[in-house]
Every structure is written in structure tokens, then in C-alpha cells.
Amino acid sequence: MSQQHPERSSPSRPPRLDASMSLLTNVMEHSLDDGYAEAAARRGAEGRSGIPRTLRAKLVLAAGLVLVALVVTLGAAQARFEAPTEARERQELVDRIQDGSRDADDLQRSVDGLREEVGTMQREALQEHGGDSGEVVALLAGAVPVEGPGIELVVDDAEDSGPGEGSGPRRSTGFADTGRVRDRDLQRVVNGLWESGAEAISVNGQRLTALSAIRAAGDAILVDNKPLVPPYTLLAVGDGERLSSRFRSSGDGRYLEVLRENYDIRTSISVEDRVQLPAAPSLTVRTAEPVKTGEGSTS
């Protein structure tokens, strides 16, 4: 019996050393030019995308472009037409405002001039018919400027003052407890200076008389209807040292000190060798008669 030789399997091909890098091998062996060529061929077969090939599509595209161009042209023309109109109207409004301001300034200068003339005639009449006490009467009435020794008292809002309401030494819910100087505060300070012996007083250059009014209009303080802004500088004519000492020790001086301590209202007082106060801007002259103090005597 013949013996069969065992079949020998053919030896297998040894594995590639770069088998684990098949992606890199594929990129190296196959150029990208084939992909570009295929894409170019496909685009050539389909035609250029985005550009209509039929006559109807081309007409629609042309009509759309014409419509867009027409809208843009009309918008530009309208803007160009309206721009001069708006500029002209704006300039007319500016001219009207400027003309009104000039007219108001002219009227104010005329009022100031007439007021000065009236004040001069009032002071002359007061000095002429006041007899021997004419100068004293004119001084007390605020009809003439005055200068002499006195004090300067400055009252200012607190640095962090703001709106608000409450109680406190002001004793009114209409006055804020936030460091704002109010008309009532200024009234008490002025009355304290009068009681301490001041002969004449002015606030921010506004001469006070027996008919002067200090009141509020919103957050503003008005003195004889003239709005004032802080700081409020009060000048008082009198014996400086005595006036300062008496005011500090008075109830109104202590009231001002309470405002400084509790509400940070800033105050300063100094004795001056010479202060100058203007005459009152408006003075109402009224007829006065002497009061009879006894039979056959007057004062």
C-alpha cells in the first residue's frame, strides 16, 4: 500500500509592517486629483448651479434685480429729498429759539433798567422826605447799599445729600432728613442773625428787608422770588465778635449746630472787618404816620 505524502500548505504572505496605518497608506497611495476630476466631471454634466438655464427663469431673475434696483433708487432719492427738509426745519427751529432768547434778554435788560430807575427814585424820595432820620430809615429799609464790619456765615448741603422725608428738628414731613438745606432752616438762621444784633443781612447777594420772603419752590429756595443755589453765603453787618458770639449761643445757632451734627450740613462762620451789602432790588414804599405815645407827643 502506497504511503501518501502529507500536503504541505503554501506559506502565507507575511503581514505588512504598515498595516496599522491603513488610513495614512491610503492617503499616500491615492492622490486627491481623482476626487477633483470626478467633481469637475459631475459639475460639467449638471451645468453650473445657481444660474438659471431656462428663459423664464432668466426673466424672473432679471425682473427681481430690476425691482431691487428700483427700491434702492427710490429710497436714496427719498432720503436725499427729506434730508434738506429736515435740516431746514431744524434750522428754522434753532433760529426761532435764538430769536426768542434775544428778545427775552432784551426784555430782561429793560426790566432791570426800569427797576434800577424806580429804586433810585425811591431812595432819593426816602432820603429827601425822611428828615434827620432819613439815612437810618433808608438803611433799615434796605434802600441803600451798606458796608462795615460784620460776619460771614456759609451754610451748605451735606456732601451725600439726597431726597427723602422724615421728622427731626425740622418737624415736618415735607423736609428731608438727608442733609439738604431747606427754606425753614434758612429762615431760622436769618431770624437768629436779626435777633443777635445784625443791622443788615444779605443771602447770596440778595439784600433782605422787613418785607423779604424766604420760601421753597420744589427743592429750590427762593428769596424774594429769586432762586438761590447752595452754598448759601449770609453777610451780616454789625459788631462782628459780639454778633458771632450771640448767634452761636442763641437757639437758632444751636439749631444750626444740630443740623451739622445730625445731618452733616456744612457750616462756617467768620468775623470780617468789612462786608459790603447791596441795596434791595425792589422796595415797596408805603405811607407811614407817627404813632402817638402820649398827649401832645409823638415818637
Image (cartoon, grey):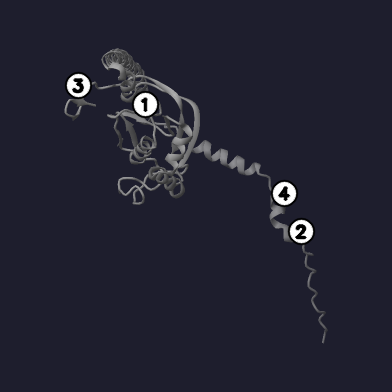
How much space separates mark 3 and mark 2, taking CA atoms?
126 Å
Give amino acid for label 3: Thr
Name the residue carrying label 3.
287
Q: Which quarter of the figure is the C terminus placed in?
A: top left
Q: Which mark is residue 72?
A: none
Where in the figure is residue 290, as x and y percent of width and height?
Answer: 21, 25
Q: Quadrant of residue 122?
A: top left
Alpha-carbon neighbours of circle 3 within 10 Å: few (<14), some, or many (≥20)?
few
Looking at the image, the residue that sits furthest to the front is 296
Residue 28, which numbered label? 4
Instruction: Estimate how packed mark 4 is, as few (under 14), some (14 to 19) or many (20 or more) residues with alpha carbons within 10 Å.
Output: few
Q: Is residue 232 left or right of residue 89?
A: right
The residue that mark 1 highlights is: 206
Asked whether residue 159 is in view, the answer is yes
Q: Earlier in the sequence, mark 3 or mark 1?
A: 1
- Please tell me whether mark 1 sits on a helix, a strand or a loop: strand
Q: Can you give x and y, in whole percent of width and height, for residue 31 in the image? A: 68, 45
Give the numbered dot on residue 18.
2
Badge 1 amino acid: Gln
Question: Considering only order in the chain, which callout, 2 or 4, is on the residue closer to the N terminus?
Answer: 2
Q: Nearer the viewer, residue 226 or 50?
A: 226
250 shown above or below 208 = below
Q: What residue appears at the point 79 percent right and 60 percent down from the top-left corner?
A: 17
Q: Residue 50: percent from the left, percent from the top?
A: 45, 35
Q: Can residue 154 be seen at all in this image of the molecule?
A: no
- What's the distance in space between the residues labelled 4 and 2, CA to CA? 12 Å
Q: Nearer the viewer, residue 119 or 30?
A: 119
Give the Cα separation between the discs numbered 4 and 3: 121 Å
